[in-house]
Each structure stands twice: as structure tokens, then as C-alpha cells.
Image (spheres, coloured by chain):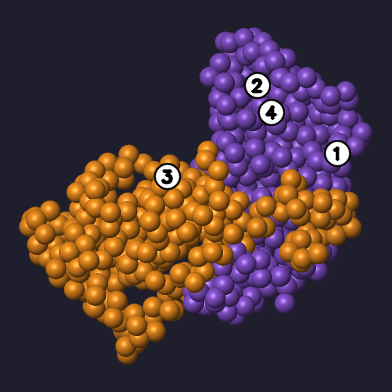
Chain colours: A orange, B purple
């Protein structure tokens, strides 16, 4: 392991891909220097647009992301892609395999691609992903795409970290129903029926629009999810998707953008606070206090709830 | 749902099985009255011997527990059995099916049997099981058996809540090796080769004794795990098992018993503290503070680690 100087790494991350990669590894490994690193990134918060891309396996997430990256690059925007797998402690084969489709951008210095696994930490991803986003913002990217694997609750949590969430489905009612069951349609600001040249695409589009229409009435000024049809492999519809994303970005300026970022920060702060409490174990700072409280509880002098309250009280 | 008065329920739990069952439901459901209930049980801590029974499915945990219950009842001791399934949000079929074997004790007022599921709460079981034990201690049971399903880490955690842990295996090398891999042999104070009349029992006994011999050298005064052979269905060897448990109970008096209870209290306090932090969400007490911290983080005025520290600082 190379020695890491947080100050230097942060300073170098705008120009050195190696420094950037090292910073993201520190985030992923929950390194002890993270508090210092994050303190150095404070003022960079909110610089990039964070776009979440999710949907069931096979919907074409990587191909669509790749097409979006090409469109944004053509407009001169720097793009980072964070591929996150909440379901697996190490990034699974499927996600890594998909990375191959991103090779078109491998030599473009304006594009940075990174896979990130949860490493089995409880709440690890909900703490790590916002930090990775912050590192990429500070490194000067205009757009950060968070691509997730589309398999349930953890995925919804990750999607909640985005400013704009794109939910992809492929034709065939199964996907749509599954996505609705998993709750990922609800988090979609833009819904994409990819592989729109396949059989059943029209029915899937109709189903999605119907589902959206059946939802609870929206408040005035609320965002109305947009449904877009694409064929990511040929680029058909990608311009419509970019337009929908731009429209949503403009809408965020009405105030919802700040609200979403505050919600994201809430989840992050809570995850870090839980981490701090978890570290109040026998081998850490709070150890002696916890041990004293525990022997009082074990001896019948104190109840465990009062002990927990006292553990959280700072000395 | 019947109204629940914690004071009355606690007072009645020594004589009323209904009150006892209701208290355990409140523990399982993480009811808001738990702090008050636990405060009323403080002085009862440590009254019962807690015996953990674990091992792979099919090793004969319920049959062995049933035989132990019969032996303890013959000695005039009141026994509670807590059957815990850490792997499933609701108690699974296998565990409920096993309960049928306990029917011999169903009409005995000195025996109380209860299944408990983790209900999918993170850390739910590590908080709930010690509380259930405390409720049963306060209700006047002399022995509390915690029977778990024997499938990995969560199981080891539950076993750690016991004063004495019994690990069962059935003949056949596979079981022994799997148990060793899962780490459950290490937590066993008493190892039982059940179904000792089956083929391969002698080899399994030899393997277990060899594994124990290969372990790190023990400190003077440390407990040396005992290996016992039983045929729980006929009662063969059960007297040896009871003797081994009594021997371990006597050894606990040397000081290790208090240490184990303190460790158990540590895990419980930590789980409750995590729960308190989790409740510092938007809809709870700390909500406004978390929201204020989050908007500072989102606006680039504060780093998330400092925010987490401040969230834990009491106002």
C-alpha cells in the first residue's frame, strides 16, 4: 500500500487519475483518513449533476449509460461513472462484464469509470456512495452517473442519492411489473423503455404511462415523470433522453435540488453516526465506558436502555 | 391489540403465562414501552442459567433440548426454551416443526416454550434476545435454553448470549467440518455428538476431540470443552450431558460467568445505542437537528463526519 497524504491526494485528484482512484479506494475501504479527506472537500459539494441509472438486469443500463456519456462528451461535459453493486460484497461478474461496453470511452480523459462494491459493511454503501460522489465532484466532473444493478431496496437507497434518477426497463410486461414491485418505478424521474425496437415495446410504454397516471395526484409544481423510448445500441431516442434529463435539471433549480441533496446528506450523516457508535466497542475509544456500563447492567444495577443513552452521551 | 400496562405485565409474568407471552411479544415487536419494562427488570439480572443449544439442522437440537428439559424438571427446576431463528424474518417451518417434539412438556406449568424471529430488524435479535432472557429470568425460570438454528454468524452471536453453549453435531464428517467452518465449534463449552448409535459416531467423536486438541494452548483455569455422546431419542448419554453442564456452571462461578454476562450486556447496549441513532430520523426527536446538519452539509458549509459527531452530541 502506498502512503497516502490526504491533502496531496485531494489536490492532485483534479489532474491525476491515479490520485483520484486512490481517493476512491480510501472511500471504499472506509479508511481512517476519510474525516480529513471529507473536510477538505466541503466546499465542492453540489458542483456536479448526479444522475442515477437503475433497472433490472438486461434492461441495457451500461449501453444506455455509454450512449449518454457520448452525448454529454459531445457537449463538452466531463463525466464520471460510478457502477455500484449493493447486492454483493465484491462487485459481481455481471457488472464487471458490462464495463466492457464502456471501453469506447476508456481513452477519453474527460471520462472516468469506477466500480464500487459494498464490501458487506452494514450501511457501508449509503455512507460510501455519497463520499465517492463528493470526491468526483471535487475532481471537476460535471456529471456523475451512479449506475446500480436494480435489485431491490438497497438499489432504491442508492438511487435516492441522485439528483435525477433514470429507471430503465426492457419490453415485456414482466420487467415492468417487477420494477413496480421493487419500488424502483417510484424513484424514477425519467423512465426509459430501452430496446424499443423489440416486440412488446409499445405495450410496455403504454403500461408505464398507465401506471404513472394511476399514481396519487401530484402537487402543483411537482415533477411529472417522463417516459422515453430508446434503442441505446443504435442511439435512437438518446437525444430525447438527454432532453428529459436537462428538463429535470432545470426543474431541480426550483428548490427541489437542494432538498434532495439535504435528504442525501441526512442519510449519509446517519450512516456515519451509526458507524461511530459501532466503533464504541471494546477495542476503541468508548470501550472503557461501554465496559463499565455493561458490568452495571450485568450486575443488575442499571437497565440497558439507560446504559445506551449514557453510551451516546459524550464524556 | 390488548392495552398493555408494563408494570402490571411484569408483576403478573411470574404467575400468568398470558402476561409472560405478552411481554415477550413486546420485546419481539421492539415496543415503545420496552425501556420502562427493562427498567423494572433490572434487579432480576443473572437469576437463571442461560444455556445455548446450537448446531446444524438435523443434529437433533429439539430432541436434545426436550431430553434436557425432562432431566431438569425431574430435579425440580423451572425451564424456559427460547427458539430463535436468526436467518429468517419470520420463524421458519423447520423450527416450528421441531416444536412438535417439545409437546411432551406442553402441559407442564414449569416449562415455557417460545419461538422468536428476528423480523428482519438489523441487529434486532442481538437486542431482543437478551431482553427476552431478562423477561424469562424475572418470571422465575431457573434455566433458560436459547435454541438456535445453527447457520453461521448470527447464530454464533446468539450463542454468545448464553452462559454455557452446547454445540450438537450428528455423525458424519460433513457436519463436523461444516460446524468448524462456521465457527460454531469454537463457541461450544460442551460438544455433543448426538445420534451416537448411528454409523460413524465413533469417528466423529475422535475428529472432534482431535480438533479440540489442535487448538491454541489454553490458559490455566480456562474451561476445557467437554465432548459427550448422546442418543437423545432414547435418553442415552443425557445424564452425562447434564453433568457436563453442571460442571460448567460451577466453573462459571470462578468469575467467568460475570465476564460473559458483561460481554452480553455490552452487545445489548451497543445494539440499543445503534437503534437510538437510527431513530434520529426525520420523524423523531433528533429530526430537526439532523435536518439542520444535513442542509449545512448539502450547502458545503460542513463535512459529514463533523455532522455525525454533532448529531451524537446531546443538545
Identify the residue shown where x is 59% and y is 17%.
B171
Tell me residue A6's x, y (percent). 54, 54
Would you name the residue on which mark 3 appears? Answer: A88
Q: Which is nearer the N-term, disc 4 or disc 1?
A: 4
Question: Residues under labels 4 and 2: Cα distance?
Answer: 18 Å
Tell me residue B103's x, y (percent). 65, 39
Would you name the residue on which mark 1 appears? Answer: B257
Q: Which is nearer the N-term, disc 1 or disc 2?
A: 2
Identify the residue shown where x is 59% and y is 59%.
A35
Q: Residues within 10 Å of mark 4 (few under 14, many from 20)?
A: some
- Number of the front mark, 4 or 2: 4
- Quarter of the picture containing the C terminus of chain A is bottom right
Chain of the residue where label 2 is placed in the rendered structure: B
Would you name the residue on which mark 2 appears? Answer: B194
Badge 3 marks a residue whose secondary structure is loop
Q: Residues within 10 Å of mark 3 (few under 14, many from 20)?
A: few
Amino acid at each position: 500500500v502506498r502512503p497516502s497524504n490526504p491533502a496531496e491526494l485531494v489536490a492532485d485528484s483534479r489532474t491525476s487519475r491515479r490520485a483520484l482512484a486512490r481517493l476512491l479506494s480510501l472511500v471504499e475501504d472506509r479508511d481512517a483518513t476519510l474525516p480529513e479527506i471529507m473536510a477538505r472537500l466541503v466546499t465542492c459539494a453540489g458542483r456536479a449533476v448526479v444522475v442515477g441509472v437503475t433497472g433490472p438486469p438486461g434492461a441495457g443500463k451500461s449501453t444506455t449509460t455509454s450512449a449518454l456519456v457520448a452525448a454529454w462528451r459531445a457537449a463538452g461535459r466531463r463525466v464520471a461513472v460510478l457502477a455500484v453493486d449493493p447486492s454483493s460484497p465484491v462487485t459481481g461478474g455481471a457488472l464487471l462484464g458490462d464495463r466492457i461496453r464502456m471501453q469506447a470511452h476508456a481513452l477519453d480523459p474527460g471520462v472516468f469509470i469506477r466500480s464500487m462494491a459494498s464490501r458487506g459493511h452494514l450501511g457501508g454503501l449509503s455512507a460510501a456512495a455519497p463520499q465517492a460522489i463528493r470526491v468526483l465532484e471535487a475532481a471537476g466532473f460535471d456529471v456523475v452517473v451512479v449506475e446500480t444493478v436494480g435489485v431491490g431496496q438497497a438499489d432504491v437507497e442508492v438511487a435516492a442519492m441522485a439528483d435525477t434518477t433514470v429507471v430503465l426497463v426492457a419490453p415485456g410486461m414482466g420487467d415492468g411489473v417487477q420494477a413496480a414491485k421493487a419500488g424502483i418505478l417510484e424513484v424514477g424521474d425519467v423512465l426509459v423503455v430501452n430496446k424499443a425496437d423489440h416486440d412488446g415495446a409499445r405495450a410496455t410504454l403504454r403500461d408505464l404511462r398507465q401506471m404513472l397516471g394511476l399514481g396519487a395526484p401530484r402537487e402543483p409544481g411537482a415533477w411529472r415523470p417522463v417516459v422515453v423510448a430508446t434503442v441505446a445500441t443504435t442511439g435512437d431516442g438518446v437525444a430525447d433522453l438527454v432532453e428529459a434529463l436537462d428538463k429535470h435539471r432545470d426543474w431541480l433549480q426550483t428548490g427541489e435540488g437542494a432538498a434532495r441533496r439535504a435528504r442525501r446528506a441526512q442519510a449519509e450523516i446517519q450512516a456515519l453516526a451509526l458507524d461511530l457508535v459501532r466503533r464504541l466497542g471494546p477495542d476503541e475509544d468508548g470501550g472503557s465506558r461501554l465496559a463499565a456500563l455493561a458490568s452495571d447492567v450485568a450486575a443488575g444495577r442499571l437497565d440497558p436502555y439507560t446504559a445506551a443513552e449514557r453510551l451516546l452521551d459524550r464524556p
